Image (spheres, grey):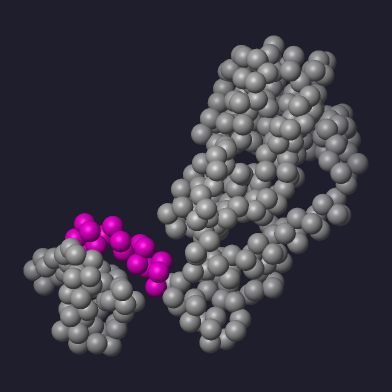
Amino acid sequence: MKTRFLESLVAVAECGSMAGAARRLNLTPAGVNQQIRALENEIGTRLLVRSGRAVRPTPAAASILDRARSVLGEVRDMKSIAASGELSGELRLGVMQTTLSGMFPDMLIPFMKAHPRIEVRILRDNSAGLYPKVMNGEIDVAVTSEPPFTVPKTHEWRVLRVEPFVVLTPVSMQCRDAHTVLAKEPFIRLDRRVYASQLIEVYLRRHGIRPDERYELDGFELIAVMVDRGLGVSLLPDWAPPWPEGLALRKLPLPDPSMVRRTGLLWARDSLRLRLIHAFMEQARLAMSSSQATRPPASTSSLTEAAQVTASGDSPYGRSTTRS
């Protein structure tokens, strides 16, 4: 399939006429029509219909227009790279909410400094929403959690960070046994659609824990705030900071240390933007290595100590903000 045929289809769809597409492409209307006919013959279905003087895509054409635009963009990227030797073009990144304010900026900043000609588009979604977007080519690479099933051989998965799960309780709660807390206290569950929640479900069943479920929410930070307000306890990954400020929480470690969430990158092996993806992966790997070397080791009591200070009105970083 020739890319100029796809260019003609996209131009006609966007201009609404053969004449408009011809002016854009510097061709004759007959030349544009000939390329559309050739594309229809190759695909085996009609792509355009006339409505008075206007031309509009058929449902078959409408279903492939986004993919055609994506392919044309990838081809332009390859031509630009080949001509300049410098990485350029567009990279579509899907990012989980819990990494968007923590891990992701640490990866994006050095990447943009190293490759200023790459244009980054960011799409936010949860882990279960990002996976199909990578599979169907809607995004090039996802910063997401590892799926609880085998990734197909057509795609690549690379771990960047491993996070233990912890039981979140209000700092005033006296019980320090994670399983007892989960079994006895009102439970705020992470949305079952996301991958971390599926790991939680498996863990609870394996250990025979039937929590008293009160709420189910998609959002780690919102759950942390509700636990702080005394609405229940929760089981969540100990995600990369920052956490919401001013919370009085305690993190209880699980007796089973194998309960972890792996966060990393997912992409297609045959992507036309593979060089851009590899460049981002390298900067992400370096950023994660640097952050682990410079930050103090995570402690299950670190949030508790900070929260107790904040709750008292004093902070090692200055006076804390009064909570509403």
Which is the main secondary structure of the residues drawn in magenta? helix
- 52 and 196: which one is in front? 196
x, y percent for residue 50: 11, 68
Residue 68 in the magenta stretch? The answer is: yes
x, y percent for residue 10: 29, 71
Residue 78 in the magenta stretch? The answer is: no
**Vertical order, 47 against 178 (above or below):** below
State the residue lying farthest toward the right.
Answer: 316
State the residue lying farthest toward the top.
Answer: 184
On the rendered structure, is 25 left or right of 59? Answer: right
On the rendered structure, is 96 left or right of 178? Answer: left
Q: Residue at coordinates 11% horizontally, 66% vertically from top-left?
A: 51
- 144 and 203: which one is in front? 203
- 38 and 210: which one is in front? 38
Residue 46 visible in the current orientation: yes
On the rendered structure, is 138 left or right of 236? Answer: left
Quarter in which the N terminus is drawn: bottom left
x, y percent for residue 214: 58, 18
On the rendered structure, is 203 left or right of 123? Answer: right
Q: How many marks?
A: 0
Image quadrant where residue 14 sits? bottom left
State the residue lying farthest toward the left.
Answer: 52
Q: Residue at coordinates 65% horizontally, 15% vertically from top-left?
A: 208
- 42 and 181: which one is in front? 42
Residue 101 visible in the current orientation: no
Magenta segment boundaries in residue numbering: 57-72
